[in-house]
């Protein structure tokens, strides 16, 4: 089946299932514009195809999807361009997945970050194996948790979404199930059999109950309580102050504070405001808000500086501008959320 994805993404019909396989293992299946448009075209076709009862999304290699192809974002910027259209189409795809009327099953057997979260977490079933690693690490590259992060993260249990958004920390299978990032957990050895059985029955709910393996969370009670305590504060400075008060005698607070201090101060402010606003907004409105932020981020210093340090000159230390949280005024953050002069994202 050809929906225009070339050799980056494969589409097949298996029994009652439309099966999508990401095929860029050497790039950790990072999403390209071509992949985004092809997946959208497939979902459009399969939505009304009576022979397709369920969609299954999986990937080759050790990653489900490490995110959007941010290196390409950097290369285009070096040439004086911006990847605005890629992000617009990616955000539309996220909403399309959320609105998709048939079961949409993501089989996550490896790294799932950023854009990988976008093509999985908005679907009805997110199945994590013991190899799954989830994160929204954007604050570490001068960006923010997009692809619907402003909608999804606030709706995770307690304040864990604010913690994940402001730290960019990774969680595994058990914590993903506990928090709501994953809906089901299985052993990776059973993935091929699960695909066959879902395709045969067209009913993922029945098959996932058969293969389900309950996995305890890794986070301790003390860590869960600390996240609830520190990340429920009403402002970013209050979160930092709460961590600072606890840090001298609390290893978790000290480690969390140290991580946050390496992140882009601008990204931290934008992320806190986006997640706070998104907690009371439907997904479509969150995506429009994120598109406003995205347009301003594409013109900012920190995004390209963060990509340079993390992925171009790997291991170098980013130089953020402004360099500290205290250097940023509320009016500086207002700019990221202001209406776009050329119109909002059409959904």
Image (tube, rainbow, N blue to C red):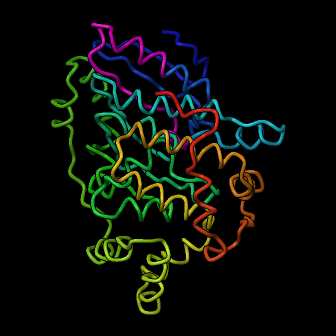
Q: Nearer the viewer, residue 195 or 205?
A: 205
Residue at left offset 54%, top offset 34%: 344
Q: Foreground residue, 127 or 194?
A: 127
Q: Is residue 158 left or right of residue 26?
A: left
Residue 325, image x and y in percent?
A: 61, 73
In the image, is residue 89 part of the stretch drawn in magenta? Answer: no
Q: Which residues are drawn in magenta?
A: 40-67
Residue at point 78% right, 56% down? Answer: 313
Residue nearest the viewer, comparing 82 with 20: 82
Residue located farthest toward the right when viewing the structure as drawn: 79
Q: Position of residue 268 (x, y in %)?
A: 55, 64
Q: Which quarter of the picture shows residue 79?
A: top right
State the image coordinates of residue 339 (x, y, percent, origin top left): 57, 43
Residue 48 covered by magenta stretch:
yes
What's the residue at 32%, 10% (across, down)? 48
Quarter of the rendering containing residue 231: bottom left
**Quadrant in the picture for residue 179:** bottom left
Instruction: Report x, y in % for residue 199.
Output: 28, 19
């Amino acid at each position: 089946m050809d929906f225009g994805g070339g050799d980056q993404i494969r589409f097949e019909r298996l029994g009652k299932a439309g099966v999508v396989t990401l095929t860029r293992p050497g790039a950790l299946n990072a999403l390209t514009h071509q992949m985004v448009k092809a997946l959208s075209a497939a979902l459009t076709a399969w939505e009304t195809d009576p022979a397709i009862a369920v969609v299954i999304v999986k990937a080759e290699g050790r990653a489900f999807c490490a995110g959007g192809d941010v290196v390409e974002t950097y290369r285009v910027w070096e040439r004086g361009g911006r990847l605005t259209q890629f992000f617009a189409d990616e955000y539309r795809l996220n909403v399309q997945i959320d609105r998709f009327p048939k079961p949409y099953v993501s089989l996550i057997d490896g790294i799932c970050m950023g854009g990988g979260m976008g093509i999985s977490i908005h679907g009805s079933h997110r199945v994590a194996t013991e190899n799954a690693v989830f994160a929204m690490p954007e604050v570490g590259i001068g960006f923010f948790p997009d692809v619907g992060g402003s909608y999804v993260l606030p709706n995770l249990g307690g304040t864990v979404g604010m913690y994940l958004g402001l730290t960019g920390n990774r969680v595994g299978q058990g914590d993903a199930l506990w928090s709501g990032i994953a809906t089901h957990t299985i052993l990776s050895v059973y993935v091929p059999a699960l695909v066959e059985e879902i395709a045969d029955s067209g009913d993922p709910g029945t098959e996932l109950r058969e293969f389900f393996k309950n996995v305890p969370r890794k986070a301790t009670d003390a860590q869960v309580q600390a996240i609830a305590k520190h990340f429920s504060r009403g402002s970013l400075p209050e979160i930092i102050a709460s961590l600072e008060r606890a840090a001298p005698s609390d290893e978790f607070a000290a480690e969390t504070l140290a991580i946050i201090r390496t992140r882009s101060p601008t990204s931290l402010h934008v992320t806190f405001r986006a997640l706070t606003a998104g907690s009371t907004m439907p997904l479509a409105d969150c995506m429009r808000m994120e598109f406003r932020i995205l347009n301003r981020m594409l013109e900012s210093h920190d995004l390209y500086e963060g990509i340079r340090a993390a992925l171009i000159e790997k291991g170098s230390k980013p130089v953020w501008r402004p360099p500290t949280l205290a250097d940023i005024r509320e009016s500086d953050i207002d700019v990221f959320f202001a209406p776009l002069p050329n119109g909002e994202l059409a959904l």
